[in-house]
Amino acid sequence: MIPLKDNIPTRTFPIITMGLIFVNIIIFIWQHIVLHASAGAMLYTYFGLVPKEFIASFVSRHDLLPYNIMTIFSSMFIHGGFLHIIGNMLYLWIFGNNIEDRLGHTGFLIFYIVSGICAALFQLFYDPSSEVPMIGASGAISGVLGAYLVCYPYARIKTILIIVIFIKIVDIPAVILLTAWFFMQFLYANVEGIAWYAHVGGFIFGLLYAFIFPAGRRTGRAVKT
């Protein structure tokens, strides 16, 4: 399922959402196009969050603690490939602008960052011995998806549905699309190369945040634009 757009209009220009997309794309271009391939690959090690090193900095290497805390934030802006960043930025644009509209610009930025932190910590505690750098914005974006599910369950998401060789564009209610997305994280949890439980952690945080702080939530059904 590849979402294309939703039918929820926004009241304000999503400057933070656009800014996050811009920064992520600029960093991606710098890493994969401007830098030499070997130098770009080293960014994963320097700016990715490595669970084993993070835990070690708390236990014995206290001098490395500030650096490892920094990687929680820097890892949100490093992506592994074209499909990785395109997928993340697509989801951020479709769902992020409405959550920014709901929370306000500053509130959304804080929410996005905290979602990323919670997602990273969830994955870190799930697999603390991993030496593979965690990278990507999907943990923070998962928080956005969780909040969107609570705030706009009846929104209609125009989606490319791919079943084997059949491709069709359909409108899917957000509650179905995002619930299916969430459970797919568990279905593919054993597939290596993706921090699936970071997605789970971010999503759960977004759900809880939207339930606990519902102020300003519009509960009416979606309208088409």
Image (tube, grey):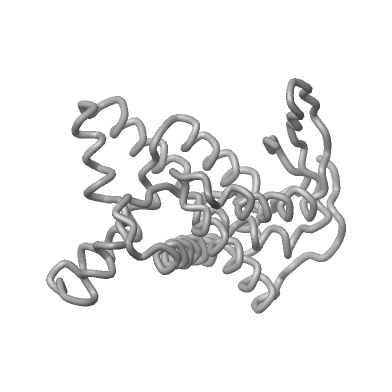
Query: Which percent across, then down, holds residue 188?
Result: 59, 47
What residue appears at the point 33 percent right and 57 percent down from the top-left corner? 130
Q: Is residue 151 above or below residue 31?
A: below
> In the figure, is residue 31 to the left or right of 57?
right
Of the 4 image quadrants, the one containing the C terminus is top right
Direction left: furthest residue? 63
> In the figure, is residue 69 to the left or right of 165?
left
Q: Is residue 68 above or below residue 81?
A: below
Q: Is residue 73 above or below residue 82?
A: below
Of the 4 image quadrants, the one containing the N terminus is top right
What residue appears at the point 73 percent right and 55 percent down from the top-left corner? 179
Query: Which of the pair 195/150 is nearer the observer?
Result: 195
Query: Which of the pair 182/103 is nearer the observer?
Result: 182
Q: Quadrant of residue 36?
A: top left
Query: Which percent across, then down, holds residue 128?
Result: 36, 65
Query: Which percent across, then down, holds residue 51?
Result: 32, 61
Q: Is residue 211 above or below residue 112?
A: below
Query: Which percent across, then down, holds residue 207?
Result: 65, 67
> In the figure, is residue 205 to the left or right of 220?
left
Direction top: furthest residue? 165
What residue appears at the point 57 percent right and 69 percent down from the top-left corner? 205
What residue appears at the point 30 percent right and 25 percent down from the top-left corner? 33
Q: Quadrant of residue 182?
A: bottom right
Could you tell me how many numbered marks the image carries?
Answer: 0
